Image (cartoon, rainbow, N blue to C red):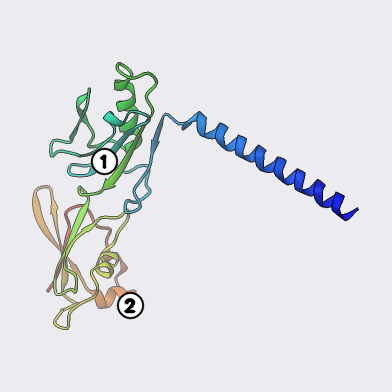
Amino acid sequence: MKKIFAMILLVCFIADTAQAERDSRANQSKGPKAQVSVAPDQNVPNDPAYKIGPQDVLKVDVWKEDQLTRTVPVRPDGKITLPLLNDVQAAGLTPMDLAGIIRDELKNYVNNPQVTVSVTEINSRRIYVTGEVVKAGTYPLLPQMTVLQALSSSGGFTQFARIKNIHILRTVNGQRVKLPFNYKEAINGKNPEQDIELRPGDVIVVP
């Protein structure tokens, strides 16, 4: 009786496994369902509202069209160059918007094109940390990034840093302005308004 029961279980297991394999092959044969999608790189914030800027690097993937799939930089004029389409405006658009434009233009050459746009490098949104910090340099500007967050990315201060006299250099209407930042006050919760949200091109100076 035990042998018969074991045989029944084995038959059921084999049948379930075969069905699962058939379902998997069927799903793979259908291909991607969405015609336009965004696939952000792991180093890029997953923000569907992100606007592409000059010097960003994009991967344009056209499903089953290897000759049209490529990684391209956004030129200073805000455009990218693609096969068949030549110059396409990219700056100021979200990856989803750009994928839709490329898809529509490719319809003249490809039957039912399925397009994915990925932002692989953000170079248009950067801030700079300079002076008496461990890791001075250029940093990607993440969404809602503040002065404290940027300083934490720079590895801390050197022993010579004057942390009460930090300032942010920002260009406003073509004019360079200097915004004071007292690190000691900020970490103690004093004058929280000085921990401002950074903008592209801001320079944090640690004297």
The residue indicated by pointer 1 is: 58
Spatial distance from mark 2 to mark 1, Cα to Cα? 41 Å
Secondary structure, mark 1, is strand
Image-based side of 126 in relation to 191, left or right: left
Mark on residue 188?
2
Secondary structure, mark 2, is loop
Q: How many marks?
A: 2
Q: Residue at x 24, y 68 (%)?
A: 151
The x and y percentages for residue 111 are 37, 18
Quarter occupied by residue 119: top left
Task: Check the image and name the residue furthest to the right.
Answer: 1
The x and y percentages for residue 113 are 37, 24
Residue type at the position of mark 2: Asn
Image-based side of 128 in relation to 47, left or right: left
Q: Are marks 2 and 1 in contact (CB under 8 Å)?
A: no
Disc 2 versus disc 1: nearer the observer: 1
Residue type at the position of mark 1: Leu
Quadrant into which the C terminus falls: bottom left
The x and y percentages for residue 169 are 13, 61
